[in-house]
């Protein structure tokens, strides 16, 4: 079987969030010998600014593109690299669209031509799928940026003589981002105007790329079993719950895995000391070094809490500010380290908190993958009070790096962290349910109590560090799904 993954982000070439990590790790797991699947895997993604320069393995090809977009013809070219025998990465060069400072936006403002940019990517993916000498049997699309691929493939089959387009799978990484554009955008797709209707991409009089993927793909997945259930409800369905209910039989939730080559505390080049579940001593060195790096007092006796994320309502960032402030005002002994960027008001709130409590709070505003590894390694507890969380990756990294996760019981957080109340022997972290500062505060107080019980703390930490969320395990579910859509 040959699977083509289409994505707008791919770690380590481009990343704003978990999508980049997931596609890159899934592709490698599917192509790797560890699964024994013998899958051939290709990935198609934009060639963003600086990518070719930073990764000399990526070579330009002679395969040029001329794709009609509305009344114009937009030219481009494929670049390619082959990291392993079964894995080929295709990068779509189109400097006007992709040679920019950001992936989707700059200064928190979306690019005005995002629809055109990702229609171009989607059409390039289909050209690749159609003309590769060994064409893919499955085309696996990720998030709204590639949501039009299934309908474009159907059109090519019915009207453009493509007798055997691949089967399509669409994965929702975050239902809140839908790619919603004015109805006039449809003209850019090259699809007939009567193909835009409520059963395809029309949603509240607009073209909705995500909806197009959900209505047209053969199978739909999302990134955790709990989120797959949550999105069927008005609270989490973002207006698409009715459609998802209709497609219930084609919808499944598959938890993301971790790339344990990148997240291996025993060999992580970003860390000052190595450690593992069997030999945890180096974690204390990581903590002390991190405290110094962040300008916090080097105190092994004070628990260090951390959070790394986009600063937005989804991630519960304002709950974090409120709760950490309340606990510090009450004189609790703790430290808190934040790495993140996003909404300006939240960035400022964390900066203010750090100014007010310089010995307890460090706030690094920015995007820094190496520092994110050092924070996971140095922290004692990791806070994830998300309003919703399709899967979440940082709690998985935290488990392996011995930072006990404290999570709101939603989506993938609920599926990956075991609370002592549910199973004391296998507990890996702390869960709380209401989305409120009071509930988060209670959960943090439990963590402070746990800090006073070293034997319990070691037990829970050890369980987390030995839990297996490897992609070798998780990718088997995707392989079973690909097999089933091919048999349909
Ligand atoms: P989402 O995709 O919703 O942002 P995930 O938890 O699925 O959330 O994935 C976020 C990914 O982005 C993780 O790998 C996380 O470490 C990384 N990340 C988020 N913010 C930052 C940051 N400021 N610096 C470095 N890495 C970050």
Image (tube, rainbow, N blue to C red):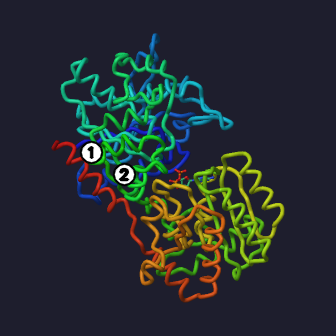
Residue 150 percent across, percent down from the top left: 32, 32
Label 2 – label 1 distance at C-alpha:
10 Å
Residue 49 is drawn in which quadrant?
top right
State the SS at label 1: strand
- The relative height of residue 243 versus residue 327 in the rendered view (above or below) is above
Q: Are marks 2 and 1 in contact (CB under 8 Å)?
A: no
State the SS at label 2: helix
- The relative height of residue 298 versus residue 219 in the rendered view (above or below) is below
Q: State how many labels appear.
A: 2
What mark, if any, has residue 40 been given in the picture? 1
Which of 87 and 474 lies nearest the eye of the viewer?
474
The 10 Å Cα crowd at callout 1, few under 14, some 14 to 19, many 20 or more, is some
- Is the residue indicated by label 2 positioned so its CB lies within 8 Å of ligand 1? no
The C terminus lies in quadrant: top left
Residue depicted at x 53% and y 28%:
114
Residue 190 is drawn in which quadrant?
top left
Could you tell whether 47 is left or right of 35 in the image? right
What mark, if any, has residue 28 been given in the picture? 2
Label whose residue precedes the other's in the sequence (2 or 1): 2
- Please, which residue is most extreme toward the top here? 71
The 10 Å Cα crowd at callout 2, few under 14, some 14 to 19, many 20 or more, is many
The N terminus lies in quadrant: top left
Residue depicted at x 51% and y 23%:
182
Residue depicted at x 44% and y 30%:
203
Residue 129 percent across, percent down from the top left: 30, 31
Residue 61 is drawn in which quadrant?
top left
């Amino acid at each position: 079987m040959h699977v083509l993954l289409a994505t707008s982000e791919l770690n380590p070439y481009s990343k704003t969030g978990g999508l980049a990590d997931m596609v890159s790790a899934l592709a490698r797991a599917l192509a790797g010998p560890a699964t024994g699947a013998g899958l051939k895997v290709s990935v198609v993604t934009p060639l963003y600014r600086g990518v070719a320069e930073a990764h000399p393995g990526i070579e330009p090809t002679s395969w040029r593109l001329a794709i009609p977009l509305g009344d114009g013809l937009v030219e481009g070219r494929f670049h390619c690299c082959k990291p392993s025998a079964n894995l080929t990465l295709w990068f779509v060069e189109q400097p006007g669209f992709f040679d920019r400072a950001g992936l989707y936006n700059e200064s928190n403002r979306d690019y005005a031509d995002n629809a055109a940019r990702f229609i171009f990517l989607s059409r390039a993916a289909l050209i690749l799928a159609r003309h590769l000498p060994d064409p893919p049997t499955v085309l696996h699309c990720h998030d709204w940026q590639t949501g039009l691929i299934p309908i474009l493939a159907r059109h090519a089959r019915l009207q453009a003589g493509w007798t055997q387009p691949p089967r399509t799978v669409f994965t929702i990484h975050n239902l809140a981002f839908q790619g919603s554009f004015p109805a006039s955008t449809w003209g850019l797709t090259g699809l007939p105007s009567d193909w835009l209707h409520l059963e395809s991409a029309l949603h509240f009089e607009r073209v909705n790329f995500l909806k197009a993927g959900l209505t047209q793909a053969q199978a739909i997945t999302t990134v955790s079993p709990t989120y797959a259930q949550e999105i069927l409800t008005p609270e989490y369905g973002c207006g698409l719950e009715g459609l998802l209910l209709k497609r219930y039989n084609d919808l499944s939730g598959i938890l993301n895995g971790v790339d344990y080559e990148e997240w291996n505390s025993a060999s992580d080049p970003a860390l000052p000391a190595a450690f593992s579940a069997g030999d945890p001593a180096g974690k204390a060195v990581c903590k002390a070094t991190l405290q110094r790096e962040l300008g916090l007092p080097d105190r092994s006796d004070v628990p260090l809490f951390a959070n790394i994320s986009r600063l937005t309502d989804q991630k519960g960032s304002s709950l974090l500010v409120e709760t950490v402030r309340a606990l510090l005002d009450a004189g609790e002994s703790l430290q808190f380290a934040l790495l993140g960027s996003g909404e300006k008001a939240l960035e400022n709130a964390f900066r203010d908190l750090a100014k007010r409590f310089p010995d307890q709070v460090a706030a690094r505003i920015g995007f820094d993958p190496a520092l994110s590894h050092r924070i996971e390694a140095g922290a004692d507890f990791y806070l994830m009070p998300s309003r919703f969380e399709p899967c979440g990756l940082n709690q998985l990294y935290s488990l392996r790096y011995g930072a006990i996760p404290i999570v709101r019981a939603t989506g993938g957080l609920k599926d990956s962290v075991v609370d002592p109340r549910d199973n004391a022997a296998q507990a890996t972290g702390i869960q709380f349910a209401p989305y409120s500062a009071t509930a988060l505060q209670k959960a943090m107080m439990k963590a402070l109590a746990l800090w006073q019980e070293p034997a319990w703390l070691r037990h829970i930490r050890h369980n987390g560090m030995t839990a297996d969320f490897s992609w070798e395990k998780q990718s088997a579910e995707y392989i079973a799904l690909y097999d089933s859509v091919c048999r349909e």
